[in-house]
Amino acid sequence: MAVDPLVLKMEAEGLNLLVESEGELVFASDGEAIEALRTVSFQSPELLEACDVALPAVGLGAAYFLILGNVDRVVSRVMSQRARAALVEEGIEYKTASCVKALPERYARSMADYDRRARSAITPQAYLVELKRVRDR
């Protein structure tokens, strides 16, 4: 499948997270994608609402952050099957160049803890509660 233009824009600008609304920049980060997504989810979740979001890869943990943020559309180079299923279940539009059972190692390393917690939590809301509990220790 072809790569979405928003993913190409993210990569051309050296970013790992790009959030746009109606073609206008809302938020961007060149830091680790899952950490940037976590930060915006906790500190300014309104920045995600009704937006298009590009990430290099989407695992289940990232998908839950995106669901909780009420995004309109998610685009990536690679997405896990569990992430895709979660987005579909919530009616969130997505486009990925590759949907895989397990994310490639270069993405899986940074997302492993988030994906593990997401699988254990079962729902996006329970995931958020668990992450807040860990954060507040």
Image (spheres, rainbow, N blue to C red):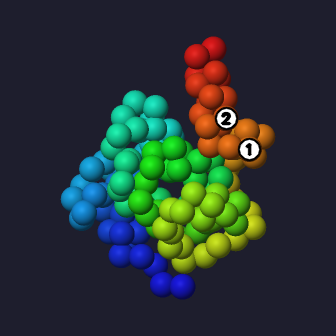
Asked whether the viewer can see residue 28, the reply is yes
Quadrant holding the N terminus: bottom right
Number of numbered callouts drawn: 2
Residue visible at 27% across and 50% down in the picture: 26
**In this picture, is 18 found above or below 78?**
above
48 left or right of 80 in image: left
- List x then y, in percent, for residue 70: 45, 49
Dots 1 and 2: beta carbons under 8 Å?
yes
31 vs 96, nearest the viewer:
96
Residue visible at 60% across and 34% down in the picture: 128
Q: Amino acid at mark 2?
A: Ala
123 vs 23, nearest the viewer:
123
Asked whether the viewer can see residue 18, the reply is no
Whole-number angstrom distance, CA of label 1 to CA of label 2: 7 Å
**Residue that carries the numbered disc 1 in the rendered image:** 122
- List x then y, in percent, for residue 61: 63, 47
- The image's mark for residue 126 is 2
- List x then y, in percent, for residue 93: 49, 67
